[in-house]
Amino acid sequence: MATRARPAAGGRWSRYEKEKPVSANRLVYLVDFDGLQVQPMLQTMQGNGWSPGRNVALKKLKEGAVAGMTPQDHRIAGTILKETHFNYYGGDQYVFDNHVWTELAGHPLLFLLHNPAIPAEIVKGEAELVITTSNRGYTFSSNITDANGDVVYLKETDTRLKIIHLNQQQRYLLNMLKQLRTVPAEGKEKLLETVKKLGTHLTIHSDLDETALSIRRLESDSRIRIQLQPFGDALKASFFVKPLGDSPRIAVPAQARATSSALCMANVARPPATWNWRKRT
């Protein structure tokens, strides 16, 4: 175990103090976005890197008895349910409830269940409405195709899943707008009034003039920002802008609509562009 010198009174180095050892275990999760399956695995540091790992029993995870658990791992363990069966075989069964996907969002150690060498990503998102000007008037589209449930799972790529929570008002509005695909050009004034109200419930991206919407105009921040995150044995670099400064809203440069309006700004307008760099050893 590594040691380091510790100064005594008067500034002289007289004895040694043991450093806290680096954790030799880590808890990873194998995920299947099609079947919505999660399998926790415990990996051990070996001479040439992390071991393939072994399955972790959900009972043990729920009890917090797995080495290397982080605060996020404990929150994930809190979504495990104990089911007791009174059939011929009897016994207890432990399963994840649907909240596990929300707690998995942002976890740096996610990998594909059917190919554990490939990192995966889960992010939280918001319900979005896009209003586009066309020669027929104004058309609506949304990132939500089925608004009947409380939680929407959007598989953006084979390795990226977005989790969106919907309240009752959002579900009603999305289902209503799904039936009203187009507003004729002569209905613009009524549309503007409607957009003002919808902005308190949905994130809206539109080609409409922001002055007509009576929205307070803010000077945008055009600086490019880079976010580095652990991504398996590499680093993932995400490039984005925060046009409203300290607001949590982020967007990909040159890919936003003319106007974005929402009461809650905690959304991602587009999946950020990413590059991977290998860590140097």
Image: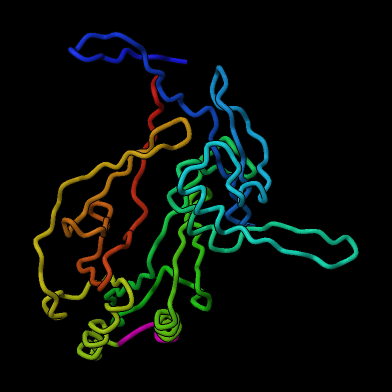
Please state which of residues 94 and 167 is positioned toward the viewer in this rendering.
94
Give the image location of residue 268, x and y in percent: 33, 59
Q: Position of residue 155 (x, y in %)?
A: 51, 58
Measured as percent of width and height from the top left, residue 56 is found at 66, 42
Q: Residue at x 56, y 53 (%)?
A: 77
What span is colored magenta in the figure? 179-183
Quadrant occupied by the C terminus: top left
Above or below, 170 relative to 232 = below
* In the displayed structure image, the side of residue 202 where residue 232 appears, left or right: right
- Inspect the magenta stretch and tell me whether residue 181 lies in it: yes
Furthest toward the right, the residue is: 88
Residue 109 sits above or below residue 62 on the image: above
Q: Residue at x 52, y 37 (%)?
A: 68
Q: Nearer the viewer, residue 83 or 168?
A: 83
**Residue at (34, 50) in percent of width and height:** 272
From the viewer's perspective, tell me whether residue 75 is left or right of residue 16.
Answer: right
**Corner quadrant of residue 212:** bottom left
* x and y, in percent, of residue 62 in the image: 61, 52
Viewer-proximal residue among 63 and 240:
63
Q: Looking at this view, is 194 or 254 the one in front?
A: 194
**In the rendered image of this protein, does residue 20 appear above or below residue 160?**
above
Colour pattern: rainbow
| Residue 189 found in image quarter | bottom left
- Would residue 129 appear left or right of 52 to someone viewing this image? left
Q: Residue at x 40, y 86 (%)?
A: 180
Numbered marks: total: 0
Q: Magenta stretch containing residue 208, yes or no?
A: no
